Image (cartoon, grey):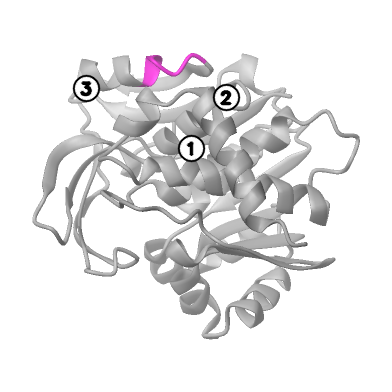
């Protein structure tokens, strides 16, 4: 079924603990999500960049055959969103060096008429007021899931709380769940977030996997045991892309918000994210094949099987 993602496309600078860094590389929540989801289902992008957005970056996005960029607006006279970060030695935490919202402070991009029939909608990280406005443009949606970050928890909490009354699911990092609720226990924080309205909450815990807190139960999935972590940027967005892409591609008659459906989808998201971290930016996803995804998913299934 049709899947649309809205969010940021940006230009990143990343520093890692081993002394490596990359300046001005392709990033953004919408970018990573769309690339990951395209391994499972066609995905439509709704995003905006400035006229400083490098043509090479657009060509990189176009390499993912399942990504429709008709909803990507290049706005003349504006500058693209930029972010810089430095990872701490554990690679699970990072310090933001700068955030330049630029075009994100302007009017959101229009949703093409051809996208309005989308049944699956993912509101990747951007201002919650923008997420709400975009959500209203998909009246026939079957599943709507949102992501957020600490910036919006601190600066736009009222809008974020309103957003949670409108979506079926929420995806966020464990430290963001604690920041939002004031609760250090992940399950307790997830249950508190359910009180705002979502049917399920997925809390990402980096190398420790992810926890699903659902109205019908709780599940925990480990991360795929990676031997080499180069750059974790975009891993969470790739996880969400794999999860939503699988749900959108499923022919199951099961409700996509059902506990078992979300848990299975999380496993696919975990596998896709394990590739993202193997290189900077989208470099690994751009060279990834579906056969590699399937092989690693089979390995992950064997790893989880209990006898």
Location of mark 2 (residue): 43
In front: 193, or 109?
193
Residue 63 rendering spot, x and y as whole percentages: 39, 15
What's the residue at 54%, 24% (across, down)? 291
Q: Residue at x 58, y 44 (%)?
A: 299
Q: Is residue 266 visible?
A: no
User: The C terminus appears in which quarter of the rendering?
Assistant: bottom right
Q: Position of residue 91 (x, y in %)?
A: 29, 63
Left or right: where does residue 174 sit relative to residue 215?
Answer: left
Position of residue 44 measured from the top left corner of the image (x, y, whole percent): 55, 23
How far apart are the alpha carbons under marks 1 and 2? 9 Å
Name the residue furthest front: 307
Magenta highlight range: 61-65
Q: Disc 3 designates what residue?
A: 51
Q: Residue at x 28, y 38 (%)?
A: 281
Frontmost of labels 1 and 3 is 1
Q: Tell which circle, 1 or 3, labels the residue nearer the N-terminal end.
A: 1
Instruction: Tell me the crowding category of disc 1: few under 14, some 14 to 19, or many 20 or more residues within 10 angstroms, Cα based.
Output: many
Q: Are marks 2 and 3 in contact (CB under 8 Å)?
A: no
Label placed on residue 33: 1
Q: Which of these two is toward me, 299 or 229?
A: 299
The image shows residue 160 at horizontal and vertical percentages of 55, 62
- Position above or below: 116 against 95: above
Q: Secondary structure at mark 2?
A: strand
Number of other residues with Cα within 10 Å of mark 2, as a class: few under 14, some 14 to 19, many 20 or more: many
Residue 215 is left or right of residue 201, and the answer is right
């Amino acid at each position: 079924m049709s899947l649309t993602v809205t969010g940021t496309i940006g230009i990143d600078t990343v520093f890692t603990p081993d002394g490596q860094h990359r300046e001005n590389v392709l990033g953004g929540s919408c970018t990573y999500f769309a690339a990951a989801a395209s391994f499972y289902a066609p995905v439509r992008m709704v995003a905006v960049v400035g006229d400083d957005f490098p043509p090479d970056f657009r060509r990189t996005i176009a390499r993912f055959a399942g990504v429709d960029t008709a909803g990507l607006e290049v706005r003349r006279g504006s500058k693209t969103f930029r972010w810089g970060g430095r990872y701490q030695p554990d690679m699970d935490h990072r310090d933001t060096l700068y955030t330049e919202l630029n075009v994100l402070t302007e009017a959101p991009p229009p949703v093409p008429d051809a996208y309005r029939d989308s049944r699956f909608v993912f509101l990747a990280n951007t201002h919650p007021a923008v997420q709400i406005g975009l959500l209203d443009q998909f009246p026939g949606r079957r599943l709507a899931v949102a992501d957020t970050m600490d910036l919006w928890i601190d600066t736009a909490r009222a809008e974020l709380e309103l957003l949670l009354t409108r979506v079926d699911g929420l995806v966020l990092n464990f430290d963001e769940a604690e920041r939002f609720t004031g609760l250090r226990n992940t399950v307790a924080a997830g249950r508190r977030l359910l009180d705002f309205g979502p049917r399920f909450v997925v809390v990402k815990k980096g190398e420790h996997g992810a926890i699903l807190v659902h109205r019908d139960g709780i599940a925990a999935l480990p991360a795929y045991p990676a031997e080499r972590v180069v750059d974790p940027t975009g891993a969470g967005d790739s996880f969400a892309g794999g999860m939503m892409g699988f749900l959108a591609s499923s022919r199951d008659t099961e409700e996509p918000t059902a506990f078992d459906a979300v848990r299975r989808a999380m496993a696919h998201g975990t596998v896709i994210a394990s590739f993202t971290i193997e290189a900077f930016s989208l470099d690994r996803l751009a060279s990834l094949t579906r056969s590699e995804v399937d092989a690693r998913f089979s390995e992950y299934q064997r790893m989880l099987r209990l006898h």
